[in-house]
Amino acid sequence: MGKLLIVGTVAIDEIETPFGKTGKILGGAATYIGLAASQFEVDSAIVSIVGDDIPSEYLDILREKGVDLSGIEIVTGGKTFYWKGKYHNDLNSRDTLITDLNTLADFNPIVPDGYKDAEVVMLGNLHPAVQMGVIEQMETRPRLIVLDTMNFWMDHALSELQEVIKHIDVITINDEEARQLTEEYSLVKAAEAIQKMGPEYVVIKKGEHGALLFHKEQVFFAPALPLEEVFDPTGAGDTFAGGFTGYLAATQDLSFNNLKNAVIHGSNLASFCVEKFGTGRMKDLKREEVNKRLHEFKALTQFDIELK
Amino acid sequence: MGKLLIVGTVAIDEIETPFGKTGKILGGAATYIGLAASQFEVDSAIVSIVGDDIPSEYLDILREKGVDLSGIEIVTGGKTFYWKGKYHNDLNSRDTLITDLNTLADFNPIVPDGYKDAEVVMLGNLHPAVQMGVIEQMETRPRLIVLDTMNFWMDHALSELQEVIKHIDVITINDEEARQLTEEYSLVKAAEAIQKMGPEYVVIKKGEHGALLFHKEQVFFAPALPLEEVFDPTGAGDTFAGGFTGYLAATQDLSFNNLKNAVIHGSNLASFCVEKFGTGRMKDLKREEVNKRLHEFKALTQFDIELK
């Protein structure tokens, strides 16, 4: 059982979609990553920061899944990172209505001693300097460092982003962000350009259109499972990352073939995440449900043309 | 060796993309369908109409591939259907600059006697009443009738479209058109709704995002091969349809598993079509190249997670 260190936000979200609105609910990248990773035999820990306004039952959701929370700093009198967003009718785009960084503004992550030798590190979307600070605290070079980021850091902290990218193995990024980072429209060319910046593997997330994994001359594609209805896309990308890294930490096999499997596991878990508001689907997700849907993924993608 | 009857336009195109512009070149749905189908062991024939302005070397391109052209009416003194279009920078959208129907305006297709027993019929995008007229000329019910259509007919000939849809087995349609036809945003729900209108199989084409095949509770997905550069998307959908029907006519196996293979063959051939202007890539495409790229499709999509 490998160790997975997760760094990212634990947040209070409010979400509105065409199907309704939530009140305040548990959110945050590290939350979704941790819930997804807990589907595998992995010893995972979250490094994050929250205020003491966070309901204890929120943290219990993660604790009950066996996620180590000793790396979550609870600031007395502080307020938890808060995000409010509204999705448009097609659910492919959203407006951020409120972002209150609160305690996250002064986040100085401290990696618990017991996880400074984690084999896999998942750096959720955060300021690249904060992500770099975590890498520097590791006692041994992790076997795999995965980084998620977004266009905001390309606009506001590009040099720090370029620096941390040099030190990682896998970047997960969406298609538009890959284009912005490289000024290449073709995703094949964008992935080549990103590999030259540092990471050996590039995962380009295309939302409902699936995800691509690039490594040198090799490329693998995992579709998103076609669903009757997407209810709330919040956390789907983080759930993908949690499935991807959780599976790799559990199996400790970093071959390209196993990274393919990790992409499928990530996509599989993300297909559940979007079926309910927030963490509603992930928090009670059964392994039998997960296994059943893997069969659907196989039927969706596997064919048996005899090759010449 | 099965018979494939292809009905559709043989056209003169002029195309502009960010990479340059063509003069007048060979185009038309039936042209691309015929070229793609010729990659398989199939006895195919095109039913179409052109003017005597069409250069004989255009028709020779198809004739040399073994496509029977006896069903192409050449109107003396008439002009061939002409289309001029310009693609936007991302190549995902285009403006039609000129459409001159010319002889196509009076197209009254006559199925050659030798193809009235074709096992597979591919009805390219045309007025739905013309498509219906072809079905009515068949002496024996074909084993598979595939129909391609577009939003124009939903806007201008919806009742005729609904009528012909009742008589077909497979519809190929793009995602936006599937939504327009059914008023369902979810492609899963749209495909269900279309199956209720008649066709047992629904292929939803998503361009660079691949194609979905639906049949009752089953769904299969073929990605588009990620390419360094897409040069000219003209004809990609028709090439897909030609690969799909050509393979099915050649193999005569209409199981869902073989339809999956047909979708892969269609996607594989479409990946070549977009690499050069017009029919430039398809007209000299070697079977060895096609087979080689099938290996890439397999590497792109196949994984070996052990299922429980």
Image (cartoon, coloured by chain):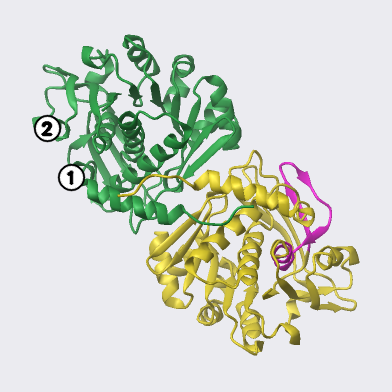
Chain colours: A yellow, B green
Residue B284 - label: 1
SS of the residue under disc 1: helix
**Res A119 → quadrant:** bottom right
Residue reaching furthest left? B56
Q: Is residue B203 magenta?
A: no
Q: Nearer the viewer, residue A171 or B126?
A: A171
Residue B60 - label: 2
Q: For the residues marked 1 and 2, what is the alpha-carbon distance in whole angstroms?
A: 13 Å
> Residue A165: horizontal and vertical position, in percent?
52, 78
Q: Earlier in the sequence, mark 1 or mark 2?
A: 2
> Residue B42: horizontal and vertical position, in percent?
25, 30
**Res A251 → quadrant:** bottom right
> Residue B30: horizontal and vertical position, in percent?
27, 29
Q: Amino acid at mark 2?
A: Asp
Q: Amino acid at mark 1?
A: Asp
Q: For the point 29% across and 45% down, which residue is it? A: B273
> Residue A132: horizontal and vertical position, in percent?
61, 83
Q: For the point 54% across and 38% down, which residue is it? A: B219
Q: Is residue B139 above or below residue B19?
A: above
